[in-house]
Image (cartoon, rainbow, N blue to C red):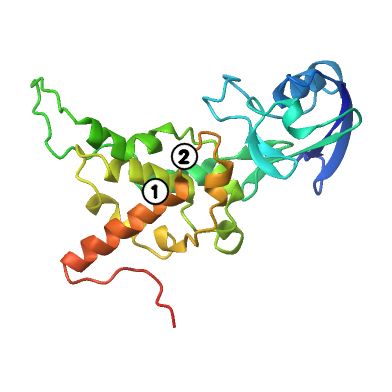
């Protein structure tokens, strides 16, 4: 089938603002949007900028907005976004990121927020130097954080979230998913090492429960559910100590 790929483009060295450029491509319904981009790059316009690596939905590097929705180009089939000959598929960079070039965005700020939640294990029972010991978990314990381990840090949830548009300092759903992964891990010390980042106006309490993050996640992670779990953990932790959370008061 013959379709048109319209791309929102930007070269900071040449352009003062974003503009659209269209390319006709011949594809099959079962090909991926990534295949169409590679075809354009190789045979029509070598200046086009976009990222991809594994091309199998694992690395998350080709996240972008496709027809207005955050998706991975390598997992989106042409038939998912174009029904017939002549259809137009519009590609845009992720929102809330600085555009480096065309569909490529600067992820530095995204990963700075990610690091704030300490996305690594604070061992509850540290293993001594030279000691070899397994820390076994039950199936039920593993199930508590299994969903969060699927995150590939593609940034789709952050782009889809309406909150950063009004509150750029919001830590974002991807960072909160990573926090939940460790807070819910029985081998981890849990919440306390991460409270400064989580129990904060820009932490979990900035989440307004729009569910857009959950809707666009290419790994089908229940992002909003995990964030709500963190809120409950924080309330329980603070209440046990007679402390207040940073949750905004509803007047």
Q: In the drawing, does residue 100 fall left or right of residue 112?
A: right
Q: Disc 1 on helix, strand or loop?
A: helix
Q: Which residue is rendered at x = 40% and y = 52% of the image?
A: 227
Residue 145 image offset from top left, x and y in percent: 32, 38
Q: How many marks?
A: 2
Residue bearing mark 1? 226
The answer to which of 40 and 180 lies nearer the viewer is 180
Residue 153 image offset from top left, x and y in percent: 49, 36
**Residue at mark 1 to residue at mark 2: CA–CA distance:** 9 Å
Residue 221, numbered circle: 2
Q: In the drawing, does residue 94 fall left or right of residue 239?
A: right
Q: Which residue is rendered at x = 62% and y = 47% of the image?
A: 97
Mark 1 or mark 2, earlier in chain: 2
Q: Disc 2 on helix, strand or loop?
A: loop
Residue 94 image offset from top left, x and y in percent: 65, 43
Q: Which residue is rendered at x = 63% and y = 26% of the image?
A: 75
For mark 2, does the 10 Å Cα neighbourhood hold few (<14), some (14 to 19), or many (20 or more) residues? many
Spot the residue most to the bottom.
Answer: 251
In the rendered image, which quarter is residue 180 located in?
top left
For mark 1, does the 10 Å Cα neighbourhood hold few (<14), some (14 to 19), or many (20 or more) residues? many
Q: Is residue 191 above or below residue 25?
A: below
The C terminus lies in quadrant = bottom left
One can see residue 28 in this view: yes
Q: In the drawing, does residue 243 fall left or right of residue 15?
A: left
């Amino acid at each position: 089938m013959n379709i048109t790929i319209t791309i929102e483009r930007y070269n900071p060295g040449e352009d003062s603002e974003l503009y659209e450029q269209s390319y006709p491509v011949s594809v099959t319904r079962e090909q991926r949007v990534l295949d169409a981009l590679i075809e354009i790059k190789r045979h029509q316009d070598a200046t086009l900028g976009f990222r991809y690596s594994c091309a199998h939905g694992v690395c998350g590097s080709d996240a972008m907005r496709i027809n207005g929705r955050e998706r991975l180009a390598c997992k989106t089939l042409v038939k998912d976004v174009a029904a017939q000959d002549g259809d137009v598929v519009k590609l845009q960079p992720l929102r809330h990121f600085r555009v480096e070039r065309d569909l490529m965005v600067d992820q530095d700020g995204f990963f700075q927020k990610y690091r704030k939640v300490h996305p690594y294990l604070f061992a509850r029972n540290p293993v001594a130097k030279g000691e070899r010991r397994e820390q076994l978990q039950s199936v039920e314990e593993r199930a508590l954080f299994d969903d969060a381990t699927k995150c590939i840090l593609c940034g789709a949830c952050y782009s889809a979230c309406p909150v950063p548009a009004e509150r750029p300092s919001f830590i974002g759903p991807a960072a909160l998913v990573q926090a939940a992964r460790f807070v819910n891990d029985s081998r981890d010390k849990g919440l306390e090492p991460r409270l400064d980042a989580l129990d904060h106006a820009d932490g979990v309490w900035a989440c307004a429960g729009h569910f857009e993050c959950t809707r666009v996640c290419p790994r089908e992670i229940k992002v909003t559910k995990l964030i709500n779990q963190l809120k409950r953990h924080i309330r329980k932790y603070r209440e046990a100590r007679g402390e207040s959370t940073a949750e905004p008061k509803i007047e």
